[in-house]
Amino acid sequence: MQTEQPQYVFGPVPSRRLGRSLGIDLVPFKTCTYDCIYCQLGRTTHKTVDRAEYVPLDAVVAEVSRKLKEGPAPDYVTLSGSGEPTLHSRLAEVISAIKRVTTTPVAVLTNGSLFWQAEVREALNEADLVVPSLDAGSPALFQRVNRPHPEVTFERMVAGLQEFRREFAKQIWLEVFLLEGLTAIPTELVRIAEIAATISPDRLQLNSVARPPAEDYARGVSLQTLRGYAGAFGERAEVIMDYEPATQGEQSHADEEEVTALLRRRPCRVEDLAQGLGLHRNEVLKYLGHLLRAGEVTGAVAHGYTYYRARSANDGPNEGESR
Ligand code: SF4
């Protein structure tokens, strides 16, 4: 029987923070307000602050409903994917519609760059959990690390996060992504910690490079170093770098299309695919073998692991290469 190929829904993705997280992609590949040097999806090809209905609301909701009926239930339905989800102009309706079809909590992984816009903060009101980013403590490093759209100034970004905290009574987990020699230096760590304190997140999560980054010079700090920094960020700080398998995935019937859909949004190891999609390792290897031979997927090594990634429309002709 021919099944419809997923366009907007991917996973579940194995997430250390969120367990088994069913991902929803609300914008086309690398449509983002930032062009982070550490982005695991490569360089941003459409840098914008224009909010639009990039993907049709009804089609997204229909696909999510279908996927949720297939089961097993994920731990979170997560708006994330291959760009910035708050760029979708009907975000509030997307969240409301999802909440009408499931009791699974809805999380939004966002870079937080548009929170200075009241309509973006309002759109996030119905989410259960919002996970924004704060990667720098000064305008200069904000420019170097996040390479934002000119309309997103450091001051606007920080003020937006602070305002959102005042308005949003549910969970905010602030992610701080640190880079060796750039933001992982004492002066910058102090600045980031001071700004983070004004946002008062429910959790502060330190992260660093685990997958191949957009720019080779974006170097990560070790897990041990991150743990050493955690104390400077207060008692709510924790280290979340990389995925540690939490549970054995339940068996599912995910097919090659679903493997590709996931790898289009997130580079994964064999173990990540097996855990996230509930597949046996041998089945994952079989699918990857097909996809590699067809040039649909490429592999790249980072930190001693091979991460697989699906080719996107932005890649050139098949010749192989490697958020
Ligand atoms: S890491 Fe996230 S915010 Fe940064 S460029 Fe990639 S998708 Fe955009």
Image: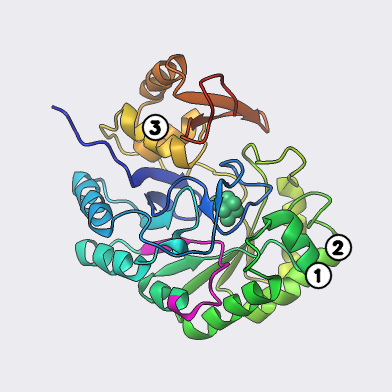
| Amino acid on which the number 2 mark rests in the picture | Pro
Look at the numbered discs 1 and 3 and tell me whether their residues touch, using CB distance below 8 Å: no
Look at the numbered discs 3 and 2 and tell me whether their residues touch, using CB distance below 8 Å: no
Tell me if 250 is positioned left or right of 146 in this view.
left
Extreme residue toward the bottom, this view: 166
Extreme residue toward the left, this view: 1
| Amino acid on which the number 1 mark rests in the picture | Val
Mark 3 or mark 2, which has the lower sequence index? 2
Marks 3/2: CA–CA distance: 41 Å
Mark 1 or mark 3, which has the lower sequence index? 1
**Is residue 24 shown to the viewer in this render?**
yes
In this figure, which residue is indicated by the disc labeled 2?
186
* 32, 122: nearer the viewer: 32
Kindly tell me whether mark 2's CB lies below 8 Å from ligand 1.
no
Tell me if 256 is positioned left or right of 69 in this view.
right
Residue at 41 percent of width and 38 percent of height? 262
Q: How is the image coloured?
A: rainbow
Residue at 45 percent of width and 35 percent of height? 263
Height in image: 303 above or below 179? Answer: above
x and y percent of residue 165 in the render?
54, 80
x and y percent of residue 91 in the render?
37, 66
Q: Residues within 10 Å of mark 2 (few under 14, many from 20)?
A: few
Q: Which residues are magenta?
A: 106-119
In this figure, which residue is indicated by the disc labeled 3?
260
| Label ID, residue 190 | 1
Residue 210, quarter of the rendered image: top right
Tell me if 273 is positioned left or right of 318 in this view.
left
Residue at 38 percent of width and 37 percent of height? 261
Q: Nearer the viewer, mark 3 or mark 2?
A: 3
Look at the numbered discs 1 and 2 and tell me whether their residues touch, using CB distance below 8 Å: yes
Marks 1/2: CA–CA distance: 6 Å
